[in-house]
Image: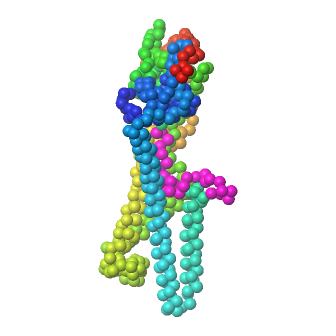
């Protein structure tokens, strides 16, 4: 949900502006900073004043009267004094501590997963050894078979960890080059919590694309232009345009022929001479990415799931058999449990203490951890599934809107090609196309002619004529041609406070 333009995190805005200024070789106009960050003009204007003061910036004035903010001595906070320096130090310490805690949590998650797997496997090996000893003591000549079984089991365990090590990308190659994949603890963490949301910065990218479009279009936009960029419905695009007017100091205006346009003159003032961004045109064709389960290889996810399933099985086993302890015997299903209790009894004061340790340490803790290890990604994936379904629909709608606005005078939904969309059947895609066209026709009062009557259970087909949109497009094109963009050129510098 968007926040109010005048309510914002000053520190975060400052950090984004400082990063942008560094990329731009420490010089920019307000319009340049707005275009590259997507931040509202008000936030940029208010924050740049503090940055100039704190970072000892300088001002340049161009022939057109435009102000260039210049930082010839670098972008480093120069405010002295005990309190400012202490605040900066605390921020650095806090950021460092946050990274340490986050990494520590990832490592702890991996240790719980792999650690319990190792412990349970070692207990299984111990049971094999005990079985071998019992067989050797009782005779029968089957010691070699038991020895081979233990060797095979140990080999398989080593192979499991070798695969996990290799597939995690944490092992350098033979030339000592850095691994291509993330470390193991990050892969385990990604299995549970995902690898991040690729849509996290989508709103910011939409705003940057909108400003890029404005710079391509002489600072003039319409509601239909917003629809083409974002794929939103007419009502949603109107709400977004109202917000853009506030964020970027735009003004609604009517042309001589009554078309409603929105002017954003301030975004055209740039220090980049001759720069015509194509960001808006590119963004029109860009589709929202779907949220993946994570970025791990499927083989690695399989091994992580196997290890956790193994832990869940044994944790549940030790938890359940603790409640059935009075009826357990050394033969059969309870033999392994009693063997583990006997092992812990060697290092505890009483057998009762050993049972308690087995219940909590070998049973309940790994069982609960493993259950959550599976439950969290399951719940997360159900939520992501809904988001992905909405994203797929929005991607199809964006293609449809672009097709309509490309040639609005005659729109035949049956000939709108939106391509294939993963997760949506072709029949569903065609239904979305028809729905989007009919919704826009109702909103814009399009003329409709019947192409084919309904027959044999097939719905009727129609052709839509968006004459008003076509007329407005021609009218807006003339308005853009009439704009003298040269008057927004900053010109050469006539004053520099650094000189």
Identified at 55% across, 87% down, the residue is 142
**Res 218 visible:** no
Nearest the camera: 26 or 466? 26
Identified at 47% across, 27% down, the residue is 52
Residue 147 in the figure: left or right of residue 78: right
Nearest the camera: 32 or 474? 32
Q: Which residues are magenta?
A: 172-200
Q: Quadrant of the N terminus?
A: top left
**Res 243 visible:** yes
Task: Identify the residue at the far right of this view.
Answer: 175
Instruction: Locate residue 5, reporting x and y percent.
Output: 38, 27
Q: Where is 293 relative to 339, above or below?
A: above
Task: Identify the residue at the far top of this view.
Answer: 256
Q: Quadrant of the C terminus?
A: top right
Q: Where is 383 relative to 130, above or below?
A: above
Q: Quadrant of residue 148?
A: bottom right
Q: Quadrant of residue 362?
A: bottom left
Identified at 68% across, 59% down, the residue is 174
Magenta residues, dominant SS class: loop
Q: Is residue 84 magenta?
A: no
Instruction: Locate residue 286, reporting x and y percent.
Output: 55, 33
Q: Where is 171 relative to 203, above or below?
A: below
């Amino acid at each position: 949900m968007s926040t109010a333009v005048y309510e914002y995190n000053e520190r975060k805005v400052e950090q984004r502006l400082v990063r942008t200024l560094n990329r731009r070789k420490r010089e920019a106009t307000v319009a340049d900073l707005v275009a590259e960050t997507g931040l509202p003009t008000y936030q940029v204007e208010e924050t740049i004043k503090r940055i100039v003061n704190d970072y000892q910036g300088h001002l340049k004035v161009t022939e057109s009267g435009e102000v260039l903010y210049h930082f010839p001595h670098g972008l480093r906070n120069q405010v002295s004094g005990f309190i400012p320096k202490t605040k900066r130090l605390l921020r650095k310490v806090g950021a460092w501590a946050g990274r340490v805690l986050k990494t520590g949590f990832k490592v702890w998650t991996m240790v719980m997963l792999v650690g319990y797997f190792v412990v349970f496997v070692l207990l299984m090996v111990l049971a094999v050894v005990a079985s071998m000893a019992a067989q050797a003591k009782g005779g029968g000549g089957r010691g070699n078979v038991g020895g081979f079984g233990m060797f095979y089991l140990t080999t398989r365990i080593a192979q499991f960890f070798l695969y996990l090590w290799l597939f995690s990308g944490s092992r350098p190659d033979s030339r000592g080059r850095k691994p291509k994949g993330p470390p193991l603890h990050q892969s385990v963490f990604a299995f549970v919590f995902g690898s991040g949301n690729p849509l996290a910065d989508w709103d910011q990218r939409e705003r940057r694309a909108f400003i890029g479009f404005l710079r391509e279009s002489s600072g003039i936009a319409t509601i239909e232009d917003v629809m083409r960029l974002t794929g939103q419905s007419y009502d949603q695009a109107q709400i977004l345009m109202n917000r853009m007017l506030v964020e970027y100091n735009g003004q609604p205006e009517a042309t001589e022929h009554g078309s409603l346009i929105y002017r954003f003159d301030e975004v055209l003032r740039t220090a980049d001479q001759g720069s015509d961004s194509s960001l808006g045109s590119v963004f029109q064709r860009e589709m929202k990415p779907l949220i993946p389960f994570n970025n791990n290889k499927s083989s690695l996810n399989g091994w992580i799931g196997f290890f956790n399933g193994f832990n869940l099985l044994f944790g549940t086993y030790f938890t359940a058999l603790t409640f059935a302890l009075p009826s357990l015997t050394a033969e059969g299903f309870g033999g392994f449990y009693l063997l583990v209790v006997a092992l812990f009894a060697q290092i505890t004061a009483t057998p009762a203490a050993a049972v308690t340790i087995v219940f909590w340490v070998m049973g309940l803790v790994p069982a609960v951890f493993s259950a959550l290890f599976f439950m969290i990604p399951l719940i997360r994936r159900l939520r992501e599934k809904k988001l992905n379904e909405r994203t797929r629909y929005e991607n199809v709608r964006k293609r449809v809107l672009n097709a309509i606005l490309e040639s609005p005078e005659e729109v035949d939904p049956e000939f709108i090609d939106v391509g294939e969309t993963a997760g949506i059947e072709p029949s569903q895609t065609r239904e979305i196309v028809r729905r989007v066209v009919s919704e826009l026709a109702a909103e814009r009062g399009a003329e409709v002619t019947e192409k084919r009557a309904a027959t044999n259970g097939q719905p009727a087909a129609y052709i839509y004529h968006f004459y008003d949109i076509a007329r407005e497009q021609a009218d807006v094109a003339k308005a853009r041609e009439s704009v003298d963009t040269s008057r927004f050129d900053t010109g050469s510098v006539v004053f520099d406070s650094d000189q």
